[in-house]
Image: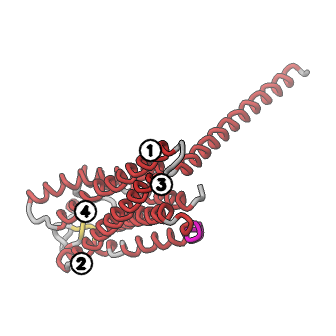
Amino acid sequence: MKTTTNLYLSSMAVSDLIIFLCLPFDLYRLWKYVPWLFGEVVCRFYHYIFEGCTSATILHITALSIERYLAISFPLRSKALVTRRRVQYIIFALWVFALVSAAPTLFLVGVEYDNDTHPDYNTGQCKHSNYAISSGKLHIMLWVSTTYFFCPMLCLIFLYGSIGCKLWNSKMDLQGPCALSRERSHRQTVKILAVVVLAFIICWLPYHIGRNLFAQVDDYETAMLSQNFNMASMVLCYLSASINPVLYNLMSRKYRAAAKRLFLLHQRQIQARHGQRQLCVIDHISTLNESLTGV
């Protein structure tokens, strides 16, 4: 589980898990948008964590894609260039960059009331502040967030397109009795790479469209359209956090093997504990019989 690829996957799994921790707050906002009952700190921190982990996940996908591109296009050079220590530094830098770039969210969201002078707590909403909208800082943050989507998307298209061309053209160099099976393996890899890019675009494009649409809400009809669209985009967003490990497990045989060994080890530990408990019960019964019979 300590290969460079698995380090990326493990870090991505942490990011996806943290994103799932934000799901109850999103479900509450869909169920009962007003009032917000969890306070100012939770409102700001929930938006910040979601924004930071979303950016971290996208950066991890891009970094892992670059590693795969190097491994397939320059296998000898990548072995010397990509090491566990360097990958650990890269993962740390990705997290720092994602969390720092999401920091403005802490100052752009909050609990807003219909009347700020005499706030009625039954009208509190966890949303972008009026100051963020009037100052234009919200639109700047949206542009930054949108850049987090389109730049990695273009990068993924280029990388996986290059990988696909490399694998597809390499079939001309395949020789020997196993050439057909290796050609099928290459084609299957190209298909998986295409699924990764499509899943990334399908799951995240509606999310960013919904965010920009929500920032332009100024009437009831637009608000209803934005709410319905954001519901669908939220489902796709959390679906992306679910399918990322599945897609990358399909691409990493070593990760699947390590996960299987880990699962079997856990099962063996449970069986060993169960066996120890049975032995303890048997010993206790034997001791009790001896004390009763005096033998």
Label ID, residue 184: 1
Q: Quadrant of the N terminus?
A: bottom right
As rendered, which of 112 and 20 lies closer to the eye? Answer: 20
* Residue mark closest to the camera, 1 vs 3: 3
Give the residue type at disc 4: His
Label 4 element class: helix
Residue 23: percent from the left, percent from the top? 35, 53
**x and y percent of residue 280 in the render?**
76, 33
Residue 208 tag number: 4
**Mark-to-mark CA distance, 4 and 1:** 37 Å
> The residue under label 2 is which amino acid type?
Lys
Whether residue 192 is in magenta: the answer is no
Q: CA distance from mark 1 to mark 3?
A: 14 Å
Quarter of the image for the C terminus: give it: top right
Q: Earlier in the sequence, mark 1 or mark 3?
A: 3
Query: Which residue is at a point 21% across and 61% down the rendered structure image?
Result: 209
Give the foreground label among 3 and 4: 3
As helix, strand or loop, the secondary structure at mark 2 comes to helix
Q: Is most of the magenta stretch helix, strand or loop?
A: helix
| Residues at discs 3 and 4 in contact (Cβ within 8 Å) | no
Name the amino acid, label 3. Answer: Asp
Residue wearing tag 3? 173
Residue pointed to by mark 2? 137
Q: Earlier in the sequence, mark 3 or mark 2?
A: 2
Upstream in the sequence, badge 2 or badge 4?
A: 2
Give the camera-side residue of 240 and 18.
240
Residue 10: image x %, image y %?
Answer: 51, 57
